[in-house]
Image: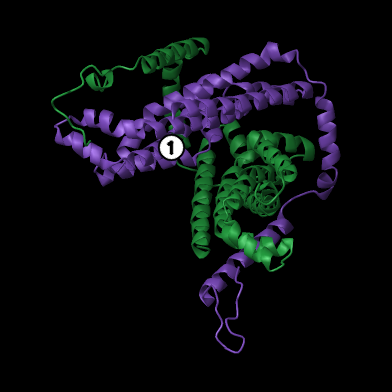
Amino acid sequence: MSASIVTKPQDSRRWQRFTPLERSARYLVYLVVVAAFIASLRTVEIIPEFLYDAPQQMADMFRRMWPLDLAAYPATIHGAMLETLHIATLGTLLSLLLAVPLALLNARNITPSAWLNWVAKFFLVASRSVNSLVWALLFVAVFGPGVLAGVLAVALRSVGFVGKLFSEALEEVNMDTVEALRATGASPLAVLLKAYWPQAKPAFYSVVLFRWDINVRESAVLGLVGAGGIGVVLNDAMNLFQWPKVATALLTIFAVVLLIELLVVQIRKRLI
Amino acid sequence: MAELNHTSPRASDPERAHPFRTSWGSRALWAGLVLYLVYAVTTLDLTWARFLVGIDQGGELLGRLFPANFARWELLLSDLIESLQIAIIASVVGIAISLFVGLLAARNLMPNLVSAPMRVFIALCRTFHPVIIAILFVKAVGFGALAGILTLIVASIGFIAKLFAEAIEEISLKQVEAIRATGAGFASIILFGVLPQVFSRFIGFSMYQLDSNLRNSTMVGIVGAGGLGGTLFSAFQRFDYDFVTAILITIIALILVGEALSNTVRRVFQ
């Protein structure tokens, strides 16, 4: 907003919010964005006819989904959905085994060695920059299709997230308490358990709950690449054009995600 | 701490007598956790033997992943460009739509009648994972970049329209009132009273979304919505693992470049 205001009508001096350099940098960004947008629009391979009849196709798809295939729910969907919840929960728990040590190594006020901090940071970043679907593809290649690949994919993707946020919480701990406990001659383990942990505990639980919530959503799609859960049912139903079953599975996911969100809000209120 | 009194230690107070006494609630939680683990592992057929076989396979896989094979760089480049196109178009359109949706969903500027349905709409956009939305769009508009673009537009609305609305709800209404007192119309109030207060935060959110659209544009291809993901998935299915490594390196490089760019833009608009 480079709105300029004339301070005095007679005066030639004008107040301007930004220096010319700042303004030209901003215009350069706008220019690049517009240019990139136009260049992408002109070169992207879109068949216009597909766009024009998209509403019609969508309507057709939803018409095929109705009525819902409720008989499929007890037969396959219920079991698969439970499997998805197990994948999300086990994956979250498993990730803690790696995330907590890495968070301790990454926190500068716990591990004084800059070199170890850097190593921990590297693992945390590596875990986060690979999407959970790619982790799942890798683990399906290693362990074969099934729940095990899903659990490991969820776990390894979560390590970076939980580890980063937990180590940030540890770094914000009030060091006076730590010092006081150290002054009594307490062992490092005691300092960790009685000085760091009580202060970082609320943040830890809230991060784990948040990640669990995300993992439930993510594990619902891991099955598309063969890593178990409701995604497998969804994929099979789509390949067989069983649209009512697809719709039932999607509605189940929707309902479970909503329920989990409500549950997380409730637990958070009690716990933190 | 003012009443540190050594003559009356108040030993009768249980809080004082055992500052670190065992909490039965947390013990029950731990027991429940162990029970759940045993139950889940037994029902899901997760065995140690399978894990060990997998570890062997993992070693073999690692051997085949390296060195990366960039022989088919032309395919890689064209997919990379398609991913970029998807991310750019989806971000620009998604942010433009989110501006209006976010404004309409802000409870301090809009009546409840307008903001409530908008909030439901935003929540709906957020509920499903982008890959599931991508599946639906692939079925509706066919394979290719268009499905990817539409998916990421929906994902962008779900994320930044919510943040936009929250940012607008936190503004100071004094400036809005001042502008209104000059007799300005609605558009002027928004442009000169609201937007200057939230503009730099909007840029921050938009850059974050561009980042996450870049990441996701390399993913939606797994279900056929264009970009690098499709090639990645088929390379996996053809056990073409050294090409997989090449694609993964490309994706990580793309994300790093995107992060550097968005940091630069953020600094310009600081």
Q: Which chain is purple?
A: A
Inspect this view and state whether residue A61 appears.
yes
Q: Nearer the viewer, residue B2 or B25?
A: B2
Q: Is residue B169 left or right of residue A185?
A: right
Q: Nearer the viewer, residue B38 or A50?
A: B38
Q: Quadrant of the N terminus of chain A?
A: bottom right
In the depicted structure, whether residue A213 falls above or below residue A24:
above
Which chain is tinted green? Answer: B
Q: Is residue A207 above or below residue A88?
A: below
Q: Residues within 10 Å of mark 1 (few under 14, many from 20)?
A: many
Residue A168 versus residue A69 in the image, above or below: below
**Which residue sits at x=67%, y=59%?**
A37
Number of callouts: 1
Q: Is residue A59 left or right of residue B61?
A: right
**Residue drawn at x 24%, y 44% as measured from the top left:** A113
User: Which secondary structure lies at badge 1?
Assistant: helix
Q: With B220 as the anchor, is A150 left or right in this view?
A: left
The percent position of residue A148, horizontal first and vertical second, equals: 50, 20
What's under tag 1, amino acid-wise? Gly
